[in-house]
Image: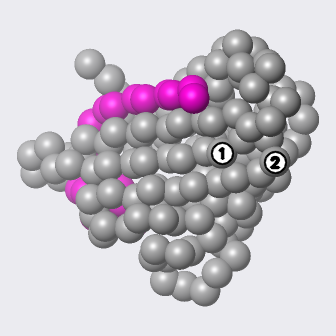
Amino acid sequence: MLRYQTRFTAPLDREQVFDDISRFDRASEWDPGVEHAELLTAEPVAQGSRFALRTRFLGRTVPFEYEIIAFEPSTRVVLRAENPFVRSIDTITFESAGADATTITYDATLDPRGATRLVTPLLALAFRRIGDAAAAGLRARLGVVSTA
């Protein structure tokens, strides 16, 4: 299993950050690897909500359908996507960091399946690059000046 984790503090209140980031249909607005994202289920977004994403991965466009498998408003959201090649679990937690600031921890795992396991070292490198680009886009979207 491959893992990518990042943590930073945004100058926004926890509820505002949670409401924005838990909506994976907005992922294309901050993740440069996402070509398209849309909500597949009815509003409001909650546990069981599903999102269709088309992502660029190793030179190919790969469809993923994410489902929210845990939803704790303003605190935590967990999304799962599976296809014949990989299973992805994204856990995003939100903690208050003083007045009008939120610490976000984004923890993503990628579990290669079947023959994809044979290229795990290549996947690890690509996963790190994709994660770094998505984290940079998310920090920019949230107005994060420094991760220190």
Q: Position of residue 43 (x, y in %)?
A: 54, 85
Name the quadrant of the C terminus: top left
Q: Nearer the viewer, residue 108 or 97?
A: 108
In the picture, measured across the screen, residue 91 lies left or right of residue 93, that is right
- Magenta stretch encompasses residue 71: no
Answer few, some or many: residues within 10 Å of disc 1's Cα (few below 14, many 20 plus, some between 14 and 19): some
Q: Indicate whether 13 appears above or below 119.
A: below
* Segment tinted magenta in the rendering: 1-20
Q: Is residue 67 visible?
A: yes
| Residue at x-position 65% and y-position 19% | 124
Q: Is residue 28 visible?
A: no
Question: In terms of secondary structure, where does tag 2 sit?
Answer: loop
Q: Indicate whether 42 appears above or below 69.
A: below
The residue under label 2 is which amino acid type? Pro
| Residue at x-position 50% and y-position 28% | 4
Which mark is drawn over residue 84?
A: 2
Q: Nearer the viewer, residue 21 or 68?
A: 68
The residue to which callout 1 is attached is 87
Q: Position of residue 110 (x, y in %)?
A: 61, 36
Q: Indicate whether 76 appears above or below 138.
A: below
In the picture, measured across the screen, residue 22 lies left or right of residue 31, that is left
Q: Position of residue 35 (x, y in %)?
A: 79, 48
Answer few, some or many: residues within 10 Å of disc 2's Cα (few below 14, many 20 plus, some between 14 and 19): few
